[in-house]
Image (spheres, helix red, strand yellow):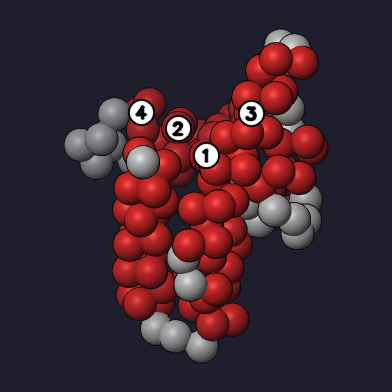
Amino acid sequence: MQDTYVKIWTHAGRYRVTGHSPMTWLITIARNTAIDRLRARRGSGDVTEYHDIHPAPGSNPETAVLARSEAGRILACLNELGEARRKAITGAYLEGLSYEELASSAGIPLNTMRTWLRRGLAALRECMAR
C-alpha cells in the first residue's frame, strides 16, 4: 500500500484529465503495483499450495478445510483443461506472468493466448457451477 501511495505522490504530475475519473488512475496504479509485487515473489505451485501460503484473513480450522476443499475442486477443474491452457491460466493468475510472457513461452501469438485464457476461464466457471 505504501508503494502505491509513494508512486501516486511522485507521479501526480503525470495525471491528465482524459474523461476518466481520478479514481480510475489511482486504482490502476494500485493494481499495477500489486501485480508487480506478486511477480517479484513468483513461485511455482498448485492452487492448494497457494492457499497455504496466502490464508484468508481471520480464517479458522473450519474455513481452512472449506478453502482446501474448494481449492481441490478448482484443481480438478483445471485438470479437465488441456495442459497448455492449464499452464496458461495458472501462469497468469497464480504466478503473475503477463500475457506476453505466456504467449512467448508457449510459442503462440498474443491474441491466441488471450483467447485461451478467456475460454479457459469460461470452462472453469462452467466446471465450478456443476
Say whether marks 1 and 2 touch (CB < 8 Å).
Answer: yes
CA separation in Å, label 4 and label 2? 9 Å
The quarter of the picture where the C terminus appears is top left
Q: Which residue is painted at 71% across and 23% down in the image?
A: 64
Question: Is 62 in front, or is 108?
Answer: 62
The answer for how far apart the CA atoms under marks 4 and 1 are is: 14 Å
Q: Which of 119 and 41 is in front in this view?
A: 119
Mark 4 to mark 3: distance in Å? 36 Å
For residue 100, say whether it is visible.
Answer: no
Q: Mark 1 points at which residue?
A: 31
Tag 2: residue type?
Ile
Please give the name of the residue rendered at 62% of the width and 43% of the height, measured from the top-left corner: 72
Mark pair 1, 3: CA separation:
25 Å
69 vs 89, left or right, is right
Question: Residue 84: x, y in percent?
Answer: 52, 75
What amino acid is at disc 3?
Ala
Name, please, the residue furthest toward the left.
19
Q: Give the residue number, with chain letter if any, for mark 4.
A: 22
Q: Could you say which is closer to the camera, residue 97 or residue 20? A: 97
